Image (spheres, rainbow, N blue to C red):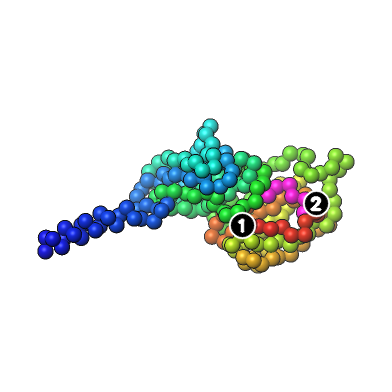
Amino acid sequence: MFRRTLLALLLAGLVAPGLMPGARAQSNDPSFRIVNNSRHVVNEVYASVANERNWGNDRLGNDIINPGANYIVRLPQGDCNYDVRIVYQGGLAEERRRINTCSLTDLQLPLVANAPVQQAQPAQPRPPQQQQAQPRPAQPPAQQGAPQGGPITGNPSFNLVNQSGRVIEEFYASAASARDWGQDRLGDATVQPGASFAVQLPQGECVYDLRAVFQGGGNQERRGVNTCALDNYVVR
């Protein structure tokens, strides 16, 4: 009986280190390590308790995370559910909502595989958890791609093509000069992986800001896109 008990204890000791990579046993410490497996430098990291309205301070301070490097984000013990926002240098700003970081060791980047490069935006107030449209930060008067003689005009409608491998449940397209995102262009529809959706926009202004919201959390944004020059807008 003693030998069987001793053997069981030894086996338990061998199994414990075999927890899945990136995961750890539940604790009340929400700190975690960011592993940058992307091709882009990370300029900013935001991690705030999921029920907070604002992102708070950049957790990197004056640091950056180079490709292949990692960085430990120290968080106070207590709350475990955090929202995380990653801002790349000259690239995509990505978000993940309600991550149980107490059960997490590594957060692997990129959060969205094969995400397209875009102009990184500063941290801004987060939308409510139901992903309602929210105000956008003010844009400079001169929009990228607009000629000096005046704004670009034409037919800004395009096909939204979902190659992300995730369901798109909301999509916003608003003129870059507008203050708000406006209505969800999908209405009651969703865009399944591999599917497309015709986004109908009024004739006139061409430069739009675009925001795709994924089912289960996370989104992608592109700013200052000349949609009059597009047939298809691909979300990867």
Query: Who is closer to the viewer here, 134 or 109?
Result: 109
Looking at numbered disc 2 in the image, what kind of residue is underneath it?
Answer: Cys
- Magenta segment boundaries in residue numbering: 222-227
Q: Is residue 174 visible?
A: yes
Q: Quadrant of the N terminus?
A: bottom left
**Residue 77 pos. (x, y %):** 38, 43
Of pointers 1 and 2, the one earlier in the residue sequence: 2
Looking at numbered disc 1 in the image, what kind of residue is underneath it?
Answer: Val
Tag count in the figure?
Answer: 2
User: Label 2 crowding class (10 Å Cα cut-off): few <14, some 14-19, many 20+?
Assistant: many
**Residue 145 pos. (x, y %):** 79, 44
Please indicate whether residue 229 sits to the left or right of residue 99 in the image.
right
Q: Secondary structure at mark 2?
A: loop
Please indicate whether residue 195 sits to the left or right of residue 157 in the image.
left
The prevailing secondary structure element of the residues shown in magenta is: strand
Disc 1 marks which residue?
A: 213
Residue 206 circle label: 2
